Amino acid sequence: MADRRLGVSAPPVDKTIRSADWDSLEISGENHRRVLFQDVDMTELSDHGSSFEECQFRNVRFNVSVHEDARFLNCVFSRCSFFDATFTGCKLTGCVFDGCTYGLLKVSGGDWSYVALPGADLRGSAFHGTRLREADLSAARLEGAELRRCDLSGAWLREADLTRCDLRGSDLSTLDPREVTMKDAIIDPFQATVVAGALGFDVRD
């Protein structure tokens, strides 16, 4: 699995695709392993069930692209843009994101365990029913974002900004409310009990 820390060496590549135009392209069931995608335009790409393993994406535009049941395993994304991109039922375990932009990113279901998104500006993004076990979201900006029914067990959230973030239904068992900003965050009654317990309150009926 790729190291979650940024600044580590990227996986080796066997092939390079450079400055290609995949704008509005539709792909299905493709398999790419150890490929470097450099300056590729994937705007409005439609991806159904393709697999990318140990690939590197540098300055790739994923804007308004749609990915369904795709697999990105141990990939590294550097300076990529994901404006209004949609990932449904996708697996991105072990991926590292460095210097990317994410405005209006939408993620439904899927497995994003062990991803590295430290410091990511995810304001306005939405993750629904996504597995984010041990994901690195430290210092991430999640103001106004949605993390609904997500598995955040073991996730790194230190110094994350969860202002106005909708967290209802998500696993907050490892969240330390003293290490994050949670002003006006939206939580459900069960989560309120979990947060109160983490703050040392003796919750009684």
Image (cartoon, rainbow, N blue to C red):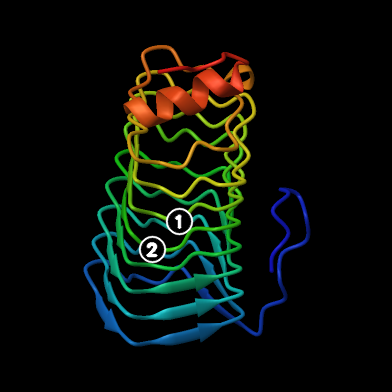
- List x then y, in percent, for residue 38: 53, 65
Which residue appears at 33% of the width and 34% of the height? 168
- List x then y, in percent, for residue 130: 39, 54
Nearest to the observer: residue 138 or residue 51: 138
| Residue 143 quadrant | top left
Nearest to the observer: residue 2 or residue 169: 169
**As displayed, is residue 127 above or below residue 96?**
above
**As displayed, is residue 107 above or below residue 94?**
above
Mark 2 residue crowding within 10 angstroms, few (<14) / some (14–19) / many (20+): many
Identified by mark 1, the residue type is Arg
- List x then y, in percent, for residue 199: 60, 16
- The reply to whether the C-beta atoms of the residues labelled 2 and 1 are less than 8 Å apart is yes
Residue 110, disc: 2
Identified by mark 2, the residue type is Gly
Q: 55 left or right of 203?
A: right
Task: Tell me the element at label 1.
Answer: loop
Which quadrant would the C terminus be assigned to in this image?
top left
* Most distant residue in the right direction: 8
Task: Tell me the element at label 2.
Answer: loop
| Residue 185 quadrant | top left
Which quadrant would the N terminus be assigned to in this image?
bottom right
Q: How many marks?
A: 2
Nearest to the observer: residue 97 or residue 115: 115
| Residue labelled with disc 1 | 131
**As displayed, is residue 61 above or below residue 152?**
below
- List x then y, in percent, for residue 187: 35, 26
- Looking at marks 2 and 1 on the same chain, the residue that comes earlier in the sequence is marked by 2
Which residue appears at 57% of the width and 44% of the height? 117
Which residue appears at 44% of the width and 41% of the height? 101
Which residue appears at 71% of the width and 71% of the height? 11
Mark 1 residue crowding within 10 angstroms, few (<14) / some (14–19) / many (20+): many
- The residues bearing labels 2 and 1 have C-alpha atoms spaced at a distance of 6 Å
